[in-house]
Structure formats: structure tokens, C-alpha cells
Amino acid sequence: MSTPTVTVNGAERAVTGVEPHVTALDWLRDQGLTGAKEGCAEGECGACSVLVARPEGTGGTRWTALNACLVPVLALDGQEVVTSEGLGRPGALHPVQREMAVRGGSQCGYCTPGFICSMAAEYYRPDRVAVDPSTNGHSAGHDEHGPNGFDLHALSGNLCRCTGYRPIRDAAYALGAPTPDDGLAGRCTAAAPAAARTRVSVGETGFARPADLGEAISLLAARDATVIAGCTDWGVEVNIRGARAPFVIAVDRLPELRTFSVDADVVEIGAALTLSEAERLLGGRVPLLDQLFPQFASRLIRNGATFGGNLGTGSPIGDAPPALLALESSVVLAGPNGEREVPLASYFTGYRKSVREPGELIRAVRIPLPLAPLTAFHKIAKRRFDDISSVAIAFALDVRDGVVARAAIGLGGVAATPLRATATEEMLVGRPWTAEIAGEAAAVLREEGTPIDDHRASAAYRAAMLGQSLLKFHTESAALEATA
């Protein structure tokens, strides 16, 4: 056992007497750093945003914005954190703080520190480059980029309730490049802190960050434990439902769970890579996932959330499973008896249940190649971004000479588990991809699953959206063919 430490705003601080459920936000505020606020305790408002030093490329550091209200402070052992207080001070404001002030981006000020930390992460993004000012940054696929290259999606997890977003956007678009003497920019050239092997015991509770996969599996075999990665799910359970765990194992930095490879017949994505990391590493190789990523919660959440966590919770309304089902993916499970690969279509067995044994971890997700050339991801929710889906549908079709040669359709929100729309797939394969056939298939798709009525949508609405989604997919694909 050793005393965990977190470097906050350049000064190392000991983390003592802290139980596994205590969040970084609560600990920081106990340290007197009250800039970060609790607004929702669910990772939806961004008032708690802080910067964490994370690995970038081959040896560099990326300042990454995270929701401090969700991350256990023990998970930051050995790490570097910057809060809004560490960016600047009165009389020596950080460029982000200065632009927010002079352009009226702060009114009551409650949300401002979180906005500033998320904005600073984008300010230091290594591949942010200015574009032609006459376009205001607008180009195909980038309609919310400023002329300075600032991507407004960096702020998608931050909510303002009184100022309005135009002055905040103005502040973001007014930022230049970091100056040569900017210490936080200079820090990006050095390596990020390595993951610290952590073992903590406080009262009847314990927390562990194992050094490798073998140690993690041994710990799982020895006791009943809660496994966390980005903690975007369990963090909500802790804050909203008062969940507590006697023993917590953090696997987000295990090297065996952070693999990435592209071979001739498969793409492998480590289960503990964050969605933001996976998006950067994929670099557009999987177009269906490119459609998924912007609709998966917010950038703040994607900076912590993982495919392993989204599949591990077994939620029927997770956004990733429908897309991965349409991609005919499989999961690699690692346990005491070695590894086994399970098709995702066979992985879920019931509500929040799966074939994963108690002593197993999801090590990776595998996507077979070649990919189906015609894909789409449709998310039906009350908000365009940063919302839980009422229904999620993913399509992957291979159409050859006008005939559907292969079809895979993944559904979420219409049954106790994510599922493949097998009846619709069978109806489509071998038939022409025409509006008439799409209409017939849409009628079949409306009957897939067992949707229920709840506060997000009625069963009838969910069923209707399934059919409409297929019709929309056909219309979109016909338009693409017409312009090809």
C-alpha cells in the first residue's frame, strides 16, 4: 500500500482516507479548488470539467477535458490535473479566460469554469489549425468549426443557462495559437504520466489499479468487485442512486486493453481505449462509427467512455451496440482460462446480462473486414446531441448490381437487449434495393423487438421509428448513388 497522489495545478497533493466512490470533483472542492461545480452529477452539464494529461501519439501529452463529477479521485493516482484556477489568475488571465471575459461569455459564472476547461482542451489540441477566414471554418462535415480551427463540439457537454451561446462561440473563435512560452503547451511535448499501480484500503472498502491484465484477472477471481474504466456509467450510479462498492478495480489504463490494430481481415479496438482515442486512431476507416461518434453523448463523455464499458454494462439503450452489431463485430473476453472470442450477436443474454463470466474482462472489440459499403446510424432522441436514445438503428448493406448481397441491422431501445433485426435482414438479402422493397422491409422492421412504453417514448412510436428509419436509409442511399 502507498499513498496515492495527484498533481493539481503543478503541485503534488496526497489523497488520503478517501473511499473508492469519492469523485475527483468532491475531492478538489475539499482541497479549496471550488471553480469546478456540480450542476447535474451525471456528466451532462460540464460545470465540473477539468483538464487531465493523457498520452498523445508516440510520447506526447494531450490535455483532455473530463467530467470530474464522474471520475473517482483514486483513479487519478499519479496523474496531472489542471483546474480553472490553474489556467490563470486575476491580472494574468489565460487566453481562454480573457476572451470569455471581454466577449461577454460569462454572466452568472456558474458554468464558466467548466466551459473554460473544455475550451482550453480544444485550444491546446495538437491538430487544430486555422482555415480560410472567408469560410468561417465551414466546409463539408465541419459546419461547426471556426476560422481558427476551433471545433464547437468540444463544448457539446457544457451547458449555459443564462448567457446564451453566441458570446461563448465568439470567444472560442477568437482564440489564436498558444504562444511559445505557454507552459501548458510546452507540457504537451513531454510524455504523459504513466498509470500508477494503486492499492488502497479504507475501512471496509478497497480500490486497485492493477499493473497488467494478469493481475486484474487475479483480483477479479479473488473477490466480488466493480470494474470501472471511464466511469461514465458507475459514476452516475454513485451520484444519483448512492451506489457503493466494497472493492473497485480500474482497468482504463491496462496496456492489454488499450491495443489498436488494422489487419487485412479485422480491426481490433482495445476495450479501454476511450471513444475519442478510438475515433482518432480509426481515422475514418469505419464510416459507420464516424456517424456514431458525434451522436454518442458529448465530447466530455467520449473522452472517458469506452467500448468495453458500453458493452460491459449490457444496457439495451447504449449507442455503441447497434453500430457494432451492424458491423458484425465480436468481443474478446479474457479470463482465468485464457481468451475467447464471442460474436456480439450472441453476447447479450438478457437485461444487462451477457455471456461474460464473473472472472472475465472484455479485452477488445473486433470488426471484420471488408466492411459493407452502405451504412448509416440513426439515433432518435429528444435532443440532437448529448442525450439518451429512445431508439438507435444501425444499417450495413452490401448492394451489388442493385441487389442486396449482405445485410446487417443493429437495434437498440426496442428490447431488453440490443439485437440484430434478423427477420428484416433475411427479407432484404437477395432482393433488389428499391423503394418498393425498402417499404416492404420497413413493415417487417416495425415488428422487430419488443418495445415498451416509458418516459422517453411509447412502444408504438419506437416501432414506427424503426420503419421510418429504413425508409430514410433507402432515400439517403439513393441520393448518394445519384450523385456518385
Image (cartoon, rainbow, N blue to C red):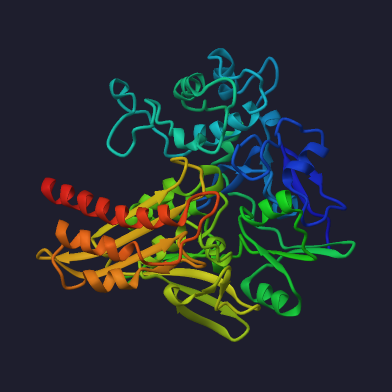
Residue 332 appears at what percent x and percent y? 49, 75
Q: Is residue 143 above or below residue 477?
A: above
Figure label count: 0
Q: Residue at x 72, y 74 (%)?
A: 219
Which quadrant of the structure image shows residue 377? bottom left
The residue nearer to you, when weighing 117 against 448, is 448
Which of the 4 image quarters holds residue 459?
bottom left
Residue name at image x 43 percent, y 34 percent: 151
Q: Position of residue 423 (x, y in %)?
A: 31, 72
- Where is 437 relative to 358, above or below? above
Furthest residue in direction left, as rendered: 401
**What quarter of the picture does the N terminus occupy?**
bottom right
Q: Is residue 88 above or below residue 369?
A: above
* Along the line of sight, the residue nearer the viewer: 54 or 383: 383
Task: Judge whether residue 57 can be spotted in this image.
Answer: no
> Residue at the bottom extreme?
337
Residue 181: image x %, image y %? 57, 27
Q: Position of residue 334 (x, y in %)?
A: 56, 77
121 displayed left or right of 7 = left
Say whether residue 270 is left or right of residue 236.
left
Question: Horizontally, is 256 left or right of 141 in the view?
Answer: right
Does residue 209 appear in this view?
Answer: yes
